[in-house]
Image (cartoon, coloured by chain):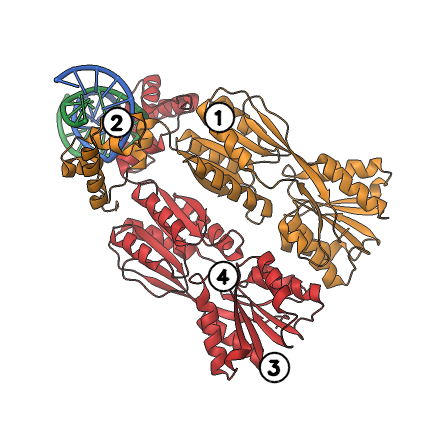
Chain colours: A red, B orange, C blue, D green
DNA sequence: TTGTAAGCGTTATCAT
DNA sequence: ATGATAACGCTTACAA
């Protein structure tokens, strides 16, 4: 049932004719301690390691060191281009620091709780989480319990953990102003689940009202942020909508779904339907028409990793907040 | 530097007025041993656990049990709809078995080696890996070392580990026959990196030759399987290609990239350009035109998880092989 | 420059 | 029905 047993540090020590202490010193990297080992001994130890194929047991190591050197990243959705690029840029930065990153995917408080559970189990040292704010209470509690947390999302600074604050509100307003200026008088707003990212549509709706659009010209629809769900939804609501209609899709993938629905229904973009995405993923540049979208000016989320690393080095740091500005990227779909 | 210290089993024992042994028995689930603990004691223990918020330290547990109850899944690409659905279906099945799944993403032998390293470190009990065959040697070596491996991909049975064999060859041939029957005499084949999935284009090319297409009517291009790279590539090769031309994109995401390139260049699909994808992702149904693609008849890869679980229960099982049939799904793009 | 020994938190064995 | 004890593999004072 258990895997075939692997060599331990004792086997290496025996084979090299030294004590386990010496082996540990040789392997624990060239800190100042490495100097206490003679070159010759070190060489013999390394030879033995290579010959036996010795690899340190992480469980034993974590138990003794009281840290695992693993960081968890919890992204929102597999289909989200945004989560993907976050995972990629965070991973490379985390690796630069000699830690390893585990990627979990899935929004929702159950996933957040699972991730925090992993921290409680000492299975990971810290959690970088993409959140829309729905699980802030869980995160606050975990941070209060001494866990290292970095949250990324459209949220404010926190006292107990670090935040990369996606400041998308001005860009959302700019997008709505833009479509209204182009003559749109009816707007459909697409939101995923309530609590997940509905702040986007709330901001959009408020701003449209302040621009003078009557409330009954605004429709909020809930559908998951994936291409197919958005396309299906759009095929239902678009034919009935007065032209020109604006669609703020809440995500780029949804926007592409809406775009396909326009093709399927023979609607012209942007003349009949003006589409705005969210995320400004690279794919916005290849569709026909190209997709107007709003997103962060920089797509490098390595800063979240840096926050985590410095927090691991000093646990009692006050919560820091890096504001990530967003802007509207006007292309041809609106 | 280390996290605030959490309660251990000793704290629980003290608080409940019992020995650590008893706490462990109470918590290790109601197997047949639970009977040896009196109801009253068990209740007191559970109360103490709840009060202190005790959670078992996974490192200590893994060290003692010599297993981590974690399974690794290594998928090819974040952008791959196929990897995504594999990860999802495998995770839910793995969880049903009381294990947890860690998802890694990234093709290439370095990633495979990193995953195997995790096995060597006792950080995980088994590895489910999506592979095109390029890293079979590494996997064989790991399996020979006693690790539990399940590989999913267009590969054959293996003696030392389990395989879910994606039998896509007949479907690829069917797809090529289909486009040729429709009058295509020139075909462009898109492959990712050599060694990753080039078997797809090799099979396609061989079959096209056997159908009588001259070799210089066949072009193989290498570009990563993502929408943007494929679109850029297609924008370059399509205008020069004789019409009608067939494109076997090697993946659905690439196919969508090619489709956008056709729109951008004013080429009609399927009349000027016939496009075939690979993977048969749900998105094939929403594009205009819908995407002809080949893929597995079933998208449930829970069977890979089942293989893993049974292998963990009995390590010396011979390598099993489940063949996953593919077929061509003809839609409007070819 | 190297070795001895204690301890990280758990679970299994063996007593009681 | 419960408890004492040893062991899992590693790191690190401290001793030599």
Residue marked by disc 1: B311
Q: Secondary structure at mark 2?
A: helix
Q: Position of residue B161 (x, y in %)?
A: 54, 25
Q: Position of residue A299 (x, y in %)?
A: 49, 60
Of badges 2 and 4, nearer the viewer stands 2
Residues marked 3 and 4, same chain: yes
* Residue at 25% across, 54% down: A144
Task: Give the chain letter at badge 1.
Answer: B
Viewer-proximal residue among B1 and A232: A232
Viewer-proximal residue among B313 and A164: B313
The circle drawn on residue A287 is none
Q: CA distance from mark 1 to mark 3?
A: 63 Å
Residue marked by disc 3: A183
Task: Give the chain letter at badge 4.
Answer: A
Q: Earlier in the sequence, mark 2 or mark 1?
A: 2
Residue marked by disc 2: B35
Q: Position of residue B286 (x, y in %)?
A: 66, 57
Instruction: Tell me the crowding category of disc 3: few under 14, some 14 to 19, or many 20 or more residues within 10 angstroms, Cα based.
Output: few
Of badges 2 and 1, nearer the viewer stands 2
Q: Secondary structure at mark 4?
A: loop
The circle drawn on residue A192 is 4
């Amino acid at each position: 049932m258990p895997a075939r047993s692997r060599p331990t540090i004792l086997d290496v020590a025996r084979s090299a004719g030294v004590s386990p202490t010496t082996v540990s010193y040789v392997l624990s990297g060239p800190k100042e301690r490495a100097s206490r080992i003679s070159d010759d001994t070190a060489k013999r130890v390394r030879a033995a390691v290579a010959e036996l194929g010795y690899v340190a047991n992480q469980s034993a190591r974590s138990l003794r060191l009281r840290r695992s050197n693993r960081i968890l990243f919890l992204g929102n959705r597999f289909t989200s281009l945004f989560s993907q690029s976050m995972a990629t840029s965070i991973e490379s930065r985390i690796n630069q620091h000699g830690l390893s990153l585990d990627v979990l995917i899935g929004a929702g408080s159950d996933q957040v709780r699972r991730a925090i559970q992993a921290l409680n189990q000492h299975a990971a040292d810290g959690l970088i989480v993409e959140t829309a704010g729905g699980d802030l209470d869980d995160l606050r509690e975990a941070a209060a319990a001494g866990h290292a947390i970095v949250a990324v999302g459209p949220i404010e600074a926190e006292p107990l953990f670090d935040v990369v604050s996606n400041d998308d509100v001005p860009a959302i307003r700019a997008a709505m102003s833009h479509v209204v200026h182009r003559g749109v008088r009816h707007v459909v707003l697409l939101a995923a689940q309530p609590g997940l990212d509905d702040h986007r549509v709330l901001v959009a709706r408020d701003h449209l009202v302040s621009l003078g659009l009557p409330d009954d010209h605004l429709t909020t629809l809930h559908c998951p942020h994936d291409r197919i769900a958005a396309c299906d939804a759009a095929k239902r609501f678009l034919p009935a909508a007065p032209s020109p209609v604006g669609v703020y899709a809440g995500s780029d993938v949804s926007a592409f779904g809406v775009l396909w629905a326009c093709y399927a229904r023979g609607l012209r973009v942007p003349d009949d339907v003006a589409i705005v995405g969210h995320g400004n993923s690279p794919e916005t540049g290849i569709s026909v028409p190209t997709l107007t979208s709003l997103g962060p000016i920089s797509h490098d989320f390595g800063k979240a990793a840096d926050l985590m690393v410095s927090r691991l080095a000093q646990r009692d740091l006050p919560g820091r907040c890096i504001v990530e500005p967003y802007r509207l990227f006007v292309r041809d779909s609106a």
